[in-house]
Amino acid sequence: MSQPFYVSPEQLMKDRADFARKGIARGRSLVAVQYADGVLLVTENPSQALHKVSELYDRLAFAAVGRYNEFENLRIAGVRLADMRGFAYDRRDVTGRGLANAYAQTLGTIFSSGGEKPYEVEIFVAEVGATAADDQIYRLTYEGRVADEHGFAVMGGDSETVASYLTEHYTGGASLAEALKVAVAALGHTGDGDRVIPVEDLEVAVLDRTRTQPRKFARLRPERVGELLGPRGTPEHAAPLPDDGGPGSASTAPGNSGPDDPADPTDQVSGDTPPLEGPTNGEPPIAPPL
């Protein structure tokens, strides 16, 4: 009977961390920015069917980068937990901190477990409060660490380049239009120069405390995003990244056995399927009462 090779715990954790980081870096960056009336979430996402930014509860939003099938499972689990807690106790008992702690426990358990691969995801849990000082942005990494971000935060892709641009150009208390312009410019900023991201390729959502209804989450349509951004230069569609399923990507390269195979949903999947939200209010349809 052959004996398995010994791997030290330190080396095992390092290998798992490197594996998760490489999977997350293949996607495109996602930016969370605090502005005067709430929290703005922006990312480059050509797909109209698969969302990186979604609603969790009345004042909570969920945003993620990495493998779509993995962070979609986490989003669904968060929605169920929030609904159960709000139904059993009170809607005010559902907080961003509570959901962030639940996500941290789940991601930490999966990362330290030797029976399955770590999740290739990073998560934002954003919460809008009654005032700007009460707004919260929690960032969760693949190993379950939780960080309380202030002002702005970036994850996925070339996050260091995007974060350096925001450090130089971000100003607190800005309007929605100003915050959106800075966030989109940061996503288009690269080491080789700046590019103009088409409005159709942007996924934009806000947690707006000025909304009269209890649900503060709203998804901005391309027409509204174009109005806020104003006139810009010639749009340049980004070259397909390894997880986009385009020509020459990791998912279509012959002989590739990496994590991005065509049969597995990835971070970016293009398609013509219309979104599930209503065309006027940008919110999911509500079924009539039985």
Image (cartoon, helix red, strand yellow):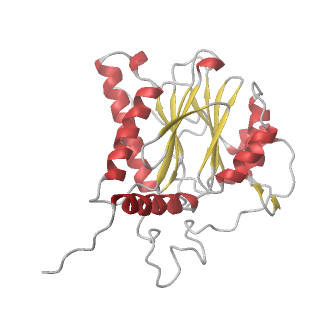
Q: Between 221 and 269, which is closer to the camera in this rendering?
A: 269
Q: Residue at x 45, y 27 (%)?
A: 97
Does 104 sit left or right of 7 as displayed? right
Q: Residue at x 76, y 40 (%)?
A: 167
> Residue 272: percent from the left, percent from the top?
56, 59
Q: Which of the image's four quarters has the C terminus?
A: top left
> Residue 213: percent from the left, percent from the top?
54, 19
Quarter residue 226 falls in:
top right
Quarter residue 237 falls in:
bottom right
Residue 32 appears in the picture as rendered: no
Residue 114 appears in the picture as rendered: yes
Q: Between 98 and 113, which is closer to the camera in this rendering?
A: 113
Look at the picture and state if 170 lies above or below 24: above
Q: Residue at x 30, y 59 (%)?
A: 116
Does 238 sit left or right of 78 as displayed? right
> Residue 283: percent from the left, percent from the top?
53, 34
Please, which residue is most extreme toward the left here?
1
Does 255 sit left or right of 227 as displayed? left
